[in-house]
Image (cartoon, rainbow, N blue to C red):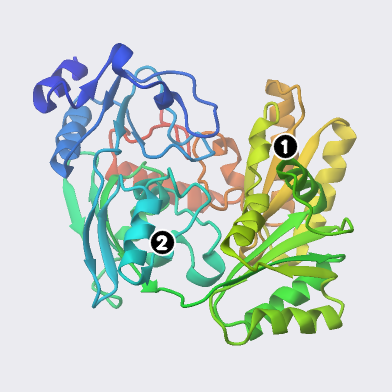
Amino acid sequence: MIVEKLKELLGEYVVLTGNDIPERARSDASRTGHQLPLAYLRPRTVEDVSTALRACNDHRQAVVVQGGLTGLSGGANPHNQSIVIAMELLAGIQEIDTEAGTMTLLSGTVLEVAQNAAEENGYLLPIDLGARGSCQIGGNLATNAGGVRVINNGMTRDNVLGLEVVLANGTILSSLNRLDKNNSGYDLKQLFIGSEGTLGVITRAVIKLRPLPTSRATALCASNNYDDILKLLHLARQELSGLSAFELMWQSFFQFSSQAMGAKSFDTDYPFALIIEQSSQAPCLEEFLGARFEEGLITDASIAKSEAERERFWLIREGLALAELPDLIEYDVSLPIGIIDLFVTNVTSQLNGEFPSIHISVFGHMGDSNIHLCISAGFIDGYVKRRITTIIYEHVRQFRGAISAEHGIGILKRDYLHYSRNHQEIALMHSIKRTLDPNWILNPGKIFAAPT
C-alpha cells in the first residue's frame, strides 16, 4: 500500500493519516471540498518531495499540493483516495542578494513573511495580495496570483527569475536563474507558473525585488460616471509616477462594506468609489486629484492623513464582511477595461431578474481589467449555483473576457475553460500535461478532466 511505502521512505513524522490529518485539508477558501485525503505529507526538504512523488508515480497515486489554501477555484481540494503534499514546513528565506536585488526562498514561505524580510533589507517584494498573511509563495506561483499591485509591478510571473520544481517522476529540476536577461533556450519556469500544480511541484523560487518606495499617498475618491473613471485612469497612468493601485468599487459593495465597518466616507452616495495609491511624490497625488475635481472626473476625495486612515480605506476595499453572507459564491474575471461597467450592468440586471433577493457585490483591480463578483442568493443549491455561474460566464464569453483572472481554473471553472480558450489551446495544454505527467498523478481533474 502506498501509505505504508511513504511511511517507510519518509517516516511517520512526515506522513500523517487518520485523525492526525488536519480538518483544513478538506478544502481551499472556496469551501467546496469535503473529503480528507488518504494521507497528509509535510515534507521538510526538497528531497522529501522528490521521494514522495517518485513513490506516488510508481504506484499511479494521485497527489494534491496544498499551500495556504486561499484559492477560490477548488484547485487544492483533495478526495479521499489522494495524497496531499502540504508545503507549510518547506519554508524559509534562503538568501537576499542586496546587490542584485533578488530573494531566494522556499515555496512554503508565507507571503507577508517574505514581504517583511524584503522591507528590512530596503526592498519591496512586488507581489501583494489581500491574503498575504496566510497565502504561500508556492501557491502564488502555481496560480500566477495577481493582487493589488499589478498595475505597477505586473503579475506574479513577471517578478520571477528562477524556479526549482520537482517533476511527477521525482526529478528535481533546478532552474534557479538570477539574471534579468537570460534567453538561453526555453524559459522553462513559465510552464509551471500558473499551472496549478498539474505539471510539477514548485519548491523554491528566485524573486526579483524592487527599491522600497520612499513615500506613499493613498486616496479614496468618488465618481458619478464610469466613462469619467476611464478618463481618470488614463490620466493617472500618464501623470502619476509610481501609480501602484487603482481599485474600483461599485455602489452596492461600497455601501455594504462601509456599513459593516461603521465607516462613513462621503456625505452622498455615489455610483462608484475608488482607491488610488501612488508610491512616489512626483507629481503630488493631491495636485493630481485637485485638477481632476476641477474637470469633473471625481466628485469627492479624501487623502489618507495617517497609516490608520490608509488601512481603513483598504479594509473597506477588502470587504471582510462578505464572508458573513450565506452561501457566498465568489467570481474572479477579466474583461476589456472599456466595457467592464456594461458587463456589470448586464449581469446584475439578469441576476436580479431571476433571483430577486440576491446580493451582488462588485469590486476589483479595474486598472488591471480584473473584477470580483461576490454573490449570495441566500438559498444556494446545485441548480441555483450552476445558473448563476452560467449567467456570469456567458457574459464573460460574450465580451471576450477571461473566466479566471488570478485564482486559476481548479475544478470549479473546469467545465467553462472553453469559454476563454479555444480548442487548439486546450489540446496543447493536454499535450504538455501528458509529456510532463504521463501517469496523470499531479492534481488530476484540475483545469481539465483526467482521462478515463
Provide the secondary structure element on which disc 1 rests.
Answer: strand
Which amino acid does the dot numbered 1 rest on? Ile
Residue placed most toward the observer, 434 or 102 = 102
Q: How many marks?
A: 2
Q: Which residue is mark 2?
A: 157
Q: Position of residue 179 (x, y in %)?
A: 25, 74
Q: Give the number of the disc on residue 375.
A: 1
**Residue at (25% x, 38% y) in the render:** 89
Vertical relation: 182 (above or below) 341: below
Say whether disc 2 or disc 1 marks the residue closer to the N-terminus.
2
Residue placed most toward the observer, 393 or 407 = 407
Q: State the CA–CA distance, disc 2 to disc 1.
A: 29 Å
Tag 2 and tag 1, C-beta contact below 8 Å: no
| Viewport quadrant of the C terminus | top left
Q: Position of residue 266 (x, y in %)?
A: 83, 59
Which amino acid does the dot numbered 2 rest on? Arg
The extreme left residue here reads 8
**Residue at (61% x, 64% y) in the render:** 368
Q: Position of residue 187 (x, y in %)?
A: 31, 65
| Viewport quadrant of the N terminus | top left
**Residue at (79% x, 51% y) in the render:** 344
Vertical relation: 112 (above or below) 55: below
Provide the secondary structure element on which disc 2 rests.
Answer: helix
